[in-house]
Amino acid sequence: MIKRLLLPLLCVLLFVQCKDRTKEGSKKIAVVVSTLNNPWFVFLAETAAAKAKTLGYDARIFDSQNNTALESDHFENIVVAGFEAILFNPTDANGSVANVLKAKSAGIPVFCMDREINSVDGATSQILSDSYSGAVSIGKYFVRQLNKKGNYVELLGLVGDNNTWARSKGFHSVTDHYSGLKMVSQQSADFDRNKAMEVMETILQAHPDIDGVFCGNDAMAMGAFQALVSAGKADKVKVFGFDGAEDMITAISENKVAATGMQFPKVMAETAAQFADEYIKGKRDFPQKIPVAVELVTAGNINDYVAYGKK
Amino acid sequence: MIALASYKKNISRFQSVIALFILCIVLGVLSDKFFTAANGLNVLRQVAVNVCIATGMTLIVLTGGIDLSVGSVLALCGAITAGLLKNGLSFPSADLFVGFTILGAVLAAVIIGALLGSFSGIVVTSFRVPPFVATLAMLTIARGLTMLYTGGHPISNLGEDFAYIGTGSLLGVPVPVWIAAVVVLIAVFITRKTKLGRYIYAIGGNETAARLSGIRINKVKLTVYAIGAALAALGGVIVTSRLDSAQPNAGISYELDAIAAVVIGGTSLNGGKGSVWGTVIGAVIIGVLNNGLVLLNVSPFWQQVVKGAVILLAVIVDKAGDKKE
């Protein structure tokens, strides 16, 4: 029964493939993204693909699921399938270098978005979010908001992730200079809203008297905020995040949380797609690295911003 | 003989209780914040979701099966609850819009959960696919459906009434704890007092013998997978309500926490042996450990090592106790 079904099914698959091929008059651009399990990266990938489509290309999104080996498979398939360019959000600064070089040797240009690779001659251009500097400006605002003294909590993202440490180090490069500021707890919540809430609930048992929370992303900031609301401490404790996600922007505008670092996935994704288009049309001279500043968003300037960008 | 068997059962249940007791004493000595009423409620609230999932998992494991898809089913059903509450269902072609009350949305999510579980159950029973593989496939499918349904973005701001399920209290006890307690009591009743319960143990003990004695194995298995996924869906409702947001990446690796609770609680992965009470203790052990490590501000790197070591220790002690008897 199943065998009898299998043959027609395979035929249908072949047919679908053929149909797809005949449709392809336009050139193809691949969007390879580290993960689609996080709204921020979904937005990055979708914006890049949408921009490529408006420029007249056929765009396809590949999800590496935070797995450099899977990313490697995607690159091999992309090379074989004859894509013209790759808009790339790497899984790992060092681990992804080999993949980029593979594409380069096949003559396919790679444009990195948001995260960098540790190689200066791999990617054609890298449009990067400056997490460290962004965290430095959050750190400065944090110090001002807490009047240079008080107890605070830091919630880290995934402890194996580059961004986690870039943000944490940037933040501490400022706050560690103030002896009045005491970090009473530093815990990981994996960039996850639910985990952040549970960790924060527990931390509040041990340290009911905190003044601020710095979180490595906005999902964790919202989770920590929810725990503070349940504990009746949301008015007293200032929450700081990173990303510029929709929920956080709304919360800042309602004066519920203090600040976030706005990243610009739209700018990065669209610039990368624009560059790819120019490359395909013959341009070869691109800057190796373009840092995209992370901007501090507070109640003071919230009216200039929307989720993931400026108004 | 019967007296001896029940004595044995009591001892093995006792072991996980002793482990929990020792763990609590140690944490109580190390942190003066551990033994407070607020922290106790905090731990119970946090384990409520895992207790719901792990209770369903216990029934499945007792039949000799396993369900790896609970985390994804939790995410999907949580997202469906949020989506129905916020946007309802609209059929543009028929010009029809259906809005949902809180109860309606929750029921719809739980029913969809049960259907997903039934699907896994049918794959396991009728197509003879091993449970590990069938539910692994469901893990991926349900996660993919969650992404499709949410577009990869969270669904937030679901209203204060809905938040009561996850954040409210009744007689000083958090609502999620009440829900978990009801789930556990029903599961205990099923396993101890009903035919279905006896069949579950019989199938896990010896499937061939169970079949020969006239038990409709497929029907029982399908039922436990449906219950397991429905409870995962209920967990999804609680998580979504607590966060006031359905996260597309909710519930990742929850199946491992649930299986850990089942195993620490003394239920055999080969089926036929174990209890729902044991699982509750197992879930509380994991919850207390999570709580204690954060209270003590242990480095996140070490936390994972310690958790793994405690799970191993609990199971080794349990096995050693079995042999002695």
Image: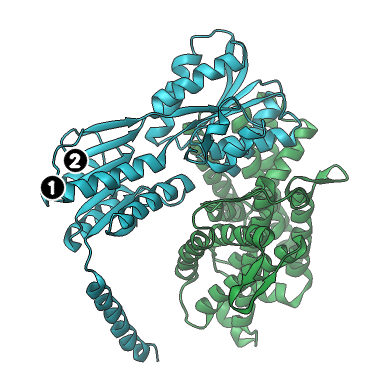
Chain colours: A cyan, B green
* Closer to the camera in the image, A122 or B72: A122
Q: Secondary structure at mark 2?
A: loop
The quadrant in which residue B94 appears is bottom right
What kind of residue is marked 2? Thr
Q: Which part of the image, by quadrant, shows the C terminus of chain B? A: bottom right
Which residue, given by chain and number where applicable, does mark 2 sit on? A124
Which residue, given by chain and number where applicable, does mark 1 sit on? A282
Classify B35 as above or below A73: above
* Closer to the camera in the image, B55 or A160: A160
The answer to whether residue A107 is visible is yes
Classify B141 as above or below A288: below
How packed mark 2 is, by other alpha carbons closer than 10 Å (few <14, some 14-19, many 20 or more), is many
How packed mark 1 is, by other alpha carbons closer than 10 Å (few <14, some 14-19, many 20 or more), is few
What kind of residue is marked 1? Gly
- What residue is at 40 percent from the left and 46 percent from the top? A44
Image coordinates of residue A45 in percent, x first then y, are: 38, 50
The quadrant in which residue A168 appears is top left
* Closer to the camera in the image, A283 or A129: A283
The answer to whether residue B290 is visible is no
